[in-house]
């Protein structure tokens, strides 16, 4: 038994070690409802994801861009791009906090002050301005706390801000360094960082952080009347509703959309994201094609298989990229590194749950026993008192003593029953569990 425990523990540790490797930070499909739906906030009453630029009233007669869609197809999924902290900020944060990090108070807080609080020098200056002298060590400690809070905020999100669990450590560091530049912390511009990533990964940033604010991952394709009523098409319909060219135009310049009954071209409600480059929008399209969005969390292994199929089916059609070019996707090693840790994790969880419920049941059993003993003792005491009373003044077998006696008997019976129940439950459960563990091993 002990050996097994140690083995699982070692297994799950090695699994942790593997997922922490920066180079294998997994790209995953967008999933679940939009952030606005999650917050139960309506499109009208939010500033999230809004650039406050709308496309032309009606781009009637505007000639489509002369770029043939084939030009886009040359971007292979594995092509690498350099993303600076400022790029990561643009893809992940600008949609809510805006170009300068000021947000839209009171709904979206500014990032400036929480970032300035991470600078020892600025903390000391602020204290001095308030007439308080603070040692550098104390200021450094405050600044470190602020830094931890900032990192925590990015990992865990806030009450109204999503968690950015898809960001890797180096990405978060690059973003924080850029926030420090935005907050005009002295010397911050010399500490800017960058990351080298695949195009699909850049697309993942944009889709998960910006488009997913309004667009849910998966669902039915709305018709013209539903669009008119305010339904926002889910991410899994976007690459069929539009080709790459229309997609790019809709996002960067605005394009009419057919709405209402009878269906007619309309300017639509979606803001224009003119701060994105053509390549970045194309990356988002590529990502949506390669990693079809999913309704909600499903088995990782299943998702991996599905994605593998999707990659080989869709890639050659739309992008004319050989599936072998799709290097960062799935290979045999990846699948084992996913399935193996998952199995180990499930096993550890089983063991944990087993151990916990055993302890719980044991505590319950002991409590029941001691309670039962207490009741026995008190009822014996009471019986003794009654006996001595009845000795003093011979009452003909009083009703009250009868009641106490029958109550005690009843309770005793009930406790005993419960106790027996626990015992049988416990033993059958234990043997079942042991069998399962044996089978699993
Ligand atoms: C979907 C909109 C949204 C996105 C995207 C977003 N934020 Fe926020 N952020 C908020 C909201 C809303 C708040 C304030 C309310 C709260 O605490 O949730 C906030 C608060 C913050 C704060 C804390 C401000 C304070 O007063 O403590 C920081 C720092 C921050 N965001 C940084 C970021 C960074 C960095 C990114 C990009 C990686 C980002 N946010 C992306 C919505 C967003
Ligand atoms: C602030 C909310 C919001 C955000 C953020 C947003 N969209 Fe939209 N989007 C909409 C709405 C609303 C519609 C419905 C059509 C309309 O009103 O323009 C829409 C429609 C679309 C369409 C369908 C166009 C058509 O002709 O069928 C595409 C494509 C699209 N969005 C892509 C994106 C991408 C990519 C992103 C991320 C860069 C994004 N959207 C971010 C609100 C948003």
Image (cartoon, grey):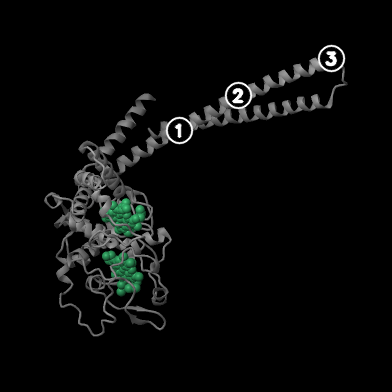
Which quarter of the figure is the C terminus placed in?
Answer: top left
- Is residue 306 found left or right of 395 in the rendered image? left
Quick one: 335 or 218, which is closer to the camera?
A: 218
The image position of residue 354, as x and y in percent, is: 45, 33
> In the rendered view, would you say 228 is above or below 375?
below
Query: What is the C-alpha distance between the residues marked 1 and 2?
Result: 22 Å
Query: What is the C-alpha distance between the residues marked 3 and 1?
Result: 57 Å
Residue at 37% across, 35% down: 348
Is residue 143 among what the camera can see? yes
Query: Dot 3: what SS?
Result: helix
- Of circles 3 and 2, which is in front? 3
Residue at 18% across, 57% down: 86
State the residue position of label 1. Answer: 354
Q: Quadrant of residue 62?
A: bottom left
Ligand 1: which quarter? bottom left
Dot placed on the residue nearer the N-terminal end, 1 or 2 = 1
> Circles 3 and 1: CB distance less than 8 Å?
no
> In the rendered view, would you say 365 is above or below 353?
above
* Badge 2 density bin: few <14, some 14–19, many ≥20, Cα 10 Å: some
Which quarter of the figure is the N terminus placed in?
Answer: top left
Q: Quadrant of residue 227?
A: bottom left
The image position of residue 328, as x and y in percent, is: 19, 52
Dot placed on the residue nearer the N-terminal end, 3 or 1 = 1
State the residue position of label 3. Answer: 392
Quick one: 342 or 162, which is closer to the camera?
A: 162
The image position of residue 410, as x and y in percent, is: 72, 29
* Badge 1 density bin: few <14, some 14–19, many ≥20, Cα 10 Å: some
Q: Which mark is residue 369?
A: 2
> In the rendered view, would you say 184 is above or below 371?
below
């Amino acid at each position: 038994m002990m050996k097994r425990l140690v083995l699982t523990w070692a297994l799950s540790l090695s699994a942790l070690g593997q997922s922490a490797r920066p180079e294998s930070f997994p790209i995953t499909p967008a999933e679940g409802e939009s952030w606005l739906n999650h917050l139960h906030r309506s499109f009208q009453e939010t500033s999230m994801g809004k650039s406050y630029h709308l496309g032309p009233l009606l781009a009637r007669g505007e000639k489509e861009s002369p770029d043939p869609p084939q030009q886009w197809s040359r971007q292979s999924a594995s092509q690498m791009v350099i993303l600076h902290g400022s790029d990561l900020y643009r893809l992940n944060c600008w949609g809510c906090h805006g170009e300068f990090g000021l947000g839209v108070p009171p709904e979206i807080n500014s990032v400036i002050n929480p970032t300035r609080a991470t600078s020892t020098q600025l903390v000391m200056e602020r204290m001095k301005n308030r007439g308080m002298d603070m040692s550098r060590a104390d200021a450094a400690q405050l600044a470190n706390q602020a830094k931890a809070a900032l990192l925590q905020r990015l990992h865990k999100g806030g009450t109204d801000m999503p968690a950015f669990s898809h960001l890797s450590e180096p990405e978060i560091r690059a973003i924080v360094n850029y926030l420090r530049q935005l907050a005009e912390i002295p010397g911050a511009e010399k500490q800017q960082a960058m990351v080298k990533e695949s195009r699909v990964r850049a697309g993942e940033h944009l889709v998960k952080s910006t488009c997913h604010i309004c667009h849910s991952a998966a669902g039915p394709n709305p018709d013209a009347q539903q669009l008119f009523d305010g339904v926002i098409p889910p991410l899994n319909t976007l690459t069929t509703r539009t080709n790459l060219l229309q997609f790019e135009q809709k996002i960067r310049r605005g394009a009419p959309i057919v709405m209402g009954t009878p269906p007619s071209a309309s300017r639509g409600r979606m803001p224009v994201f003119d701060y994105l480059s053509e390549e970045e929008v194309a990356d988002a399209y590529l990502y949506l094609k390669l990693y079809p969005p999913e309704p909600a969390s499903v088995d990782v292994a299943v998702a991996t298989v599905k994605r593998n199929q999707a990659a080989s089916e869709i890639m050659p059609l739309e992008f004319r990229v050989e599936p072998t070019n799709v290097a960062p996707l799935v290979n045999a090693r990846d699948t084992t590194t996913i399935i193996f840790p998952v199995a180990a994790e499930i096993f550890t969880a089983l063991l944990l749950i087993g151990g916990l419920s055993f302890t719980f049941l044991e505590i319950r059993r002991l409590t029941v026993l001691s309670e039962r003993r207490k009741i026995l003792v008190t009822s014996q005491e009471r019986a003794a008192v009654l006996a001595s009373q009845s000795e003093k003044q011979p009452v003909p077998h009083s009703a009250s003593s009868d009641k106490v006696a029958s109550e005690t008997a009843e309770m005793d019976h009930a406790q005993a029953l419960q106790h027996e129940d626990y015992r049988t439950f416990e033993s059958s459960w234990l043997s079942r569990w042991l069998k399962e563990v044996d089978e699993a091993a």
